[in-house]
Image (cartoon, grey):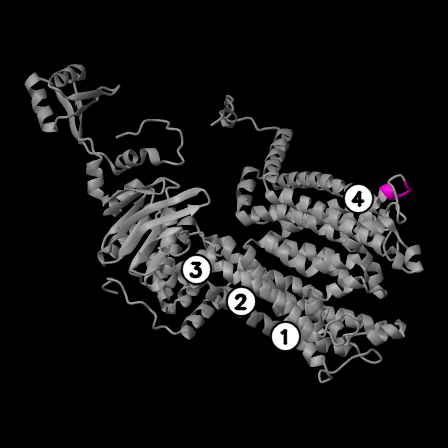
């Protein structure tokens, strides 16, 4: 289990992490969500003892990372796939890592096999594609067979095959009782992989909930209706108190009534319906609603976000 | 591996085991990049070739040298003068042994695997020092024997058993090792290759020239306390001149510079963010 | 996206008209200039060179002024004011060599070279642009440095010791020679950087060629050395501003020799850049 208490990191005048508390529990895949510059990487670096917190503490299984001997047996991390010496072979890169923590040589062959890099084990890492470097980084995280795993953007550069593989891997690691923390921007992946979410914005914790709850909390329960005579239907619905919005193509968005009620009302008034759909908000939409003001680096919006 | 409810702390692993693990890791890193063998090979060429060129030159021109020059001629120093060229390579090699990890970002992985950062730097320096020392001492002997063979009569030459000769030859290997370590610790301090190289070469090569430009006896005295000129005494046979230090004093000067770079390196590596 | 980056109106065949050679050259020059001026070492290195050379050179001259009474007659007779003043350039040339090397090795170090070569597949054009810009920068900064060094040093010597002014015969030529030397040194650094591709190797070569090699070889006089040692780049360069010939070649020969180094290295660098993978 990873536990942070009032964790705070200040670089000069910038507050990267602003006194956050969280727990990452074993047996789940916990997702770290947040805009660029929100503080996710900084928090991960503090967990791993790379940066010293300005104040507050963060522990893994009750211990600070800096004092741990041979930590790879307990914590495995993928932070930056490109943080390798380009002239070294994949095998030697992992071998050096393994030797530092007394991990047996054959374990290196095992993890290379697990990530599918056995055929290129003796090749220079500098010539690896992004996906291959990513797999190498994942292999490094698995080396010590640790109980806690941290992944920063693990699907970056992987093909659909690889994405499915890593998703399955993370789920199985969590099912084995390990603690898995994943930081990612890929909403669709997060929605499929994570059980629990930590949403961070501008260094602050915005949400610490199971995935399903987050979606439910930020849902509208809108109903989407397509009809032969949308204007008349809209008028009929407004009369009974529904909030109705109309898209240019005639699709109606109805708030305040369930789809069952709308269907029955439409039948009473003799409308022909083409489509009646419950719209649950996606994780992406929920995330945008939650982090709306917290986005640090934002491109000008070319189009409204589709629901 | 089954349950992962939190494993017991590994305080039961002895310090010796931990140091050996770190040393093994640093050795694998050392031997698995091309720059290591390349530098060692280049030194293997420079030292003997320089010995051969210089000693042949002095043997041929021996008769035309003045008696004063003949008297002050240092056969060991001349055959080991390739060290002045090799020190560029060995020093740069020391720098990139350290800065290589910072520029590639690998240093983060290294510190994640071994949070005891001083231990990492110490073992990195140790592995570097052992390999470089063994290799350069070997080459020092090779250069010496080549040189003395070429400095046949009537040119002045010595045998390995003559007083001071053995010290000087071992001194050659020691000198290069310390230069390499100086580069390594400067590399840990400055973390970027161009800057660290500029600092190393500045202290080693430029400072003596700059002080020499001032001329006069004060500058000659001062120069002896620079790492290059002071350290050189360790592989000289003759220590004439009013201001020159003895071999071990000169060595101490160089060692002091290395220590002066190492101390802040060890302190800062723990405090700074990786 | 701004309008400049929008594709030009399609011709009837559907393809954009190729920009002329002049346009391409200007584009490459623009890109290289923007990269160059935003590189910190481009500003820092010449500035450091100036500060060090002018500062230390002045110190040396001051020292001569202070120790003049204690000098022997032979020393006084052979005193060469410009030599003493410009001696610091044996160190100054290192700054310029490193400057040239860093222009290129920086791009290889951070991987920017791939984007550069992708944007302009005509690699010879890139090297030409870098060479032109570096020559300009080196020329300007070495000119400022040398003239400032001259004025500072001779100013200190004036009134106490023999000194020279720019109006004296041959003096201006020697100052210009020093400027030429420093500029060619930066080009040697540039081409070495292209061939070596790593800052460590390139910088070691610069220090090796300009400092270590002369130290080792300048004491060798006989035989084959007499014909080769004077042609070391550092000895050629020093011949352009030193007063005595000694074992050094004549200034004309020196200038040609340095130009020959530039040409040979330039050809090797072009070949290396065009042939090798990024």
Above or below residue C40? Residue A58 is below
- Image location of residue A221, percent across then percent down: 17, 31
Q: CB under 8 Å between callouts 3 and 4?
A: no
Q: Secondary structure at mark 2?
A: helix
- Disc 1: which chain? B
- Disc 2: which chain? B
Q: Is B31 or B3 nearer to us in this picture?
A: B3
Select label 2 or label 1 by which is in front.
Answer: 2
Q: Give the main secondary structure of the magenta stretch.
A: loop
Give me the disc on residue C152.
4
- Disc 3: which chain? B
- State yes or no: residue A11 in magenta: no
Q: CA distance from mark 4 to mark 1?
A: 48 Å
Within 10 Å of disc 4 (Cα), the crowding (few <14, some 14-19, many 20+) is some
Between disc 2 and disc 3, whose residue precedes?
Answer: 3
Between disc 2 and disc 1, whose residue precedes?
Answer: 2
- Image location of residue C130, percent across then percent down: 65, 41
Q: CA distance from mark 1 to mark 3?
A: 32 Å
- Disc 4: which chain? C
Q: Is C14 or A224 nearer to us in this picture?
A: A224
Q: CA distance from mark 3 to mark 4?
A: 51 Å
Q: CB under 8 Å between callouts 2 and 4?
A: no
Q: Is B265 or B62 nearer to us in this picture?
A: B265
Q: Are discs 3 and 4 both within one chain?
A: no
Q: Which portion, as a residue range, is magenta? A: C168-172
Residue at the spot of label 1 = B137
Residue at the spot of label 2 = B125
């Amino acid at each position: 289990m990873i536990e942070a208490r009032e964790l705070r990191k200040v670089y000069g005048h910038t507050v990267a992490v602003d006194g956050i508390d969280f727990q990452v529990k074993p047996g789940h895949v916990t997702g770290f969500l947040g805009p660029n510059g929100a503080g996710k990487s900084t928090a991960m670096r503090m967990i791993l003892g790379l940066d010293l917190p300005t104040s507050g503490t963060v522990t893994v299984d009750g211990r600070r990372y800096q004092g741990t001997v041979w930590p790879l047996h307990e914590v495995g991390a993928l932070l930056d796939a490109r943080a390798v010496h380009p002239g070294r072979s994949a095998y030697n890169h992992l071998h050096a890592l393994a030797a530092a923590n007394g991990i047996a040589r054959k374990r290196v062959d095992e993890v290379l096999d697990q990530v599918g890099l056995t055929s290129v084990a003796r090749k220079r890492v500098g010539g690896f594609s992004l996906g291959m470097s990513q797999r190498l980084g994942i292999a490094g995280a698995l080396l010590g067979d640790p109980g806690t795993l941290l992944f920063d953007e693990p699907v970056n550069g992987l093909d659909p095959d690889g994405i499915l593989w890593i998703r399955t891997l993370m789920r199985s690691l969590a099912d084995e009782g390990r603690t898995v923390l994943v930081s990612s921007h890929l909403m669709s992946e997060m929605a499929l992989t994570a059980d629990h979410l930590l949403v961070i914005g501008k260094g602050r914790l915005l949400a610490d909930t199971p995935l399903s709850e987050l979606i439910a909390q930020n849902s509208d329960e809108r109903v989407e209706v397509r009809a032969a005579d949308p204007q008349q239907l809209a008028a009929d619905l407004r009369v009974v108190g529904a909030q109705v919005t109309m898209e240019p193509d005639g699709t109606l968005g109805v708030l305040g009534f369930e789809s069952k009620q709308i269907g029955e009302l439409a039948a009473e008034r003799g409308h022909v319906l083409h489509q009646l759909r419950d719209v649950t908000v996606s994780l992406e939409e929920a995330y945008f609603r939650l982090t709306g003001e917290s986005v640090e680096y934002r491109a000008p919006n070319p189009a409204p976000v589709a629901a | 591996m089954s349950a992962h409810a939190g494993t017991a702390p590994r305080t039961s692993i002895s310090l010796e085991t931990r140091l050996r693990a770190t040393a093994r890791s640093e050795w694998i890193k050392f031997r698995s990049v091309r720059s290591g063998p390349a530098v060692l090979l280049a030194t293997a060429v420079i030292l003997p070739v320089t010995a051969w060129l210089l000693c042949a030159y002095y043997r041929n021109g021996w008769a035309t040298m003045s008696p004063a020059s003949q008297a002050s001629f240092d056969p060991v120093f001349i055959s080991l003068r390739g060290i002045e060229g090799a020190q560029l390579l060995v020093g740069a090699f020391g720098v990139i042994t350290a800065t290589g990890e910072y520029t590639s970002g690998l240093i983060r992985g290294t510190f994640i695997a071994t949070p005891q950062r001083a231990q990492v730097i110490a073992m990195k320096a140790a592995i570097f020092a052992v390999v470089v020392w063994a290799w350069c001492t070997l080459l020092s002997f090779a250069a010496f024997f080549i040189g003395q063979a070429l400095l046949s009569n009537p040119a002045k030459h010595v045998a390995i058993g003559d007083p001071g000769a053995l010290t000087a030859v071992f001194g050659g290997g020691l000198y290069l090792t310390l230069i390499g370590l100086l580069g390594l610790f400067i590399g840990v301090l400055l973390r970027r290759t161009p800057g660290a190289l500029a600092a190393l070469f500045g202290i080693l090569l430029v400072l003596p020239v700059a002080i020499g430009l001032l001329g006069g006896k004060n500058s000659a005295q001062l120069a002896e306390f620079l790492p290059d000129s002071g350290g050189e005494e360790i592989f000289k046979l003759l220590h004439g001149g009013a201001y020159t230090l003895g071999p071990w004093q000169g060595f101490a000067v160089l060692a002091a510079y290395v220590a002066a770079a190492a101390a802040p390196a060890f302190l800062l590596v723990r405090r700074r963010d990786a | 996206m701004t309008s400049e980056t929008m594709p030009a109106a399609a011709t009837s065949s559907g393809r954009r008209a190729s920009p002329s050679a002049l346009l391409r050259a200007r584009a490459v020059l623009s890109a290289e200039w923007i990269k160059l001026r935003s590189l910190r070492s481009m500003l820092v290195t010449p500035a450091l060179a100036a500060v060090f050379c002018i500062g230390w050179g002045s110190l040396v001259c001051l020292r001569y002024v202070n120790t003049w009474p204690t000098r022997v007659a032979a020393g006084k007779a052979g005193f060469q004011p410009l030599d003493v003043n410009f001696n610091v350039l044996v160190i100054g040339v290192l700054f310029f060599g490193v400057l040239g090397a860093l222009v290129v090795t920086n791009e290889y170090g951070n991987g920017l070279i791939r984007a550069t070569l992708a944007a302009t597949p005509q690699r010879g054009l890139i090297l030409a642009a870098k060479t032109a810009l570096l020559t300009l920068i080196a020329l300007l900064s070495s000119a400022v440095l040398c003239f400032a060094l001259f004025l500072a040093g001779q100013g200190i010597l004036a009134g106490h010791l023999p000194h020279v002014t720019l109006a004296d015969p041959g003096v201006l030529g020697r100052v210009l020679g020093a400027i030429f030397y420093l500029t060619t040194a930066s080009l040697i650094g540039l081409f070495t950087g292209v061939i070596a591709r790593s800052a460590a190797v390139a910088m070691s070569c610069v220090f090796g060629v300009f400092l270590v090699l002369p130290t080792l070889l300048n004491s060798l006089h006989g035989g084959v050395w007499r014909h080769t040692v004077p042609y070391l780049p550092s000895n050629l360069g020093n011949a352009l501003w030193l007063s005595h010939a000694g074992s050094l070649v004549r200034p004309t020969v020196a200038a040609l020799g340095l130009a020959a180094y530039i040409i040979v290295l330039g050809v090797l660098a072009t070949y290396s850049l065009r042939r090798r993978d990024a």
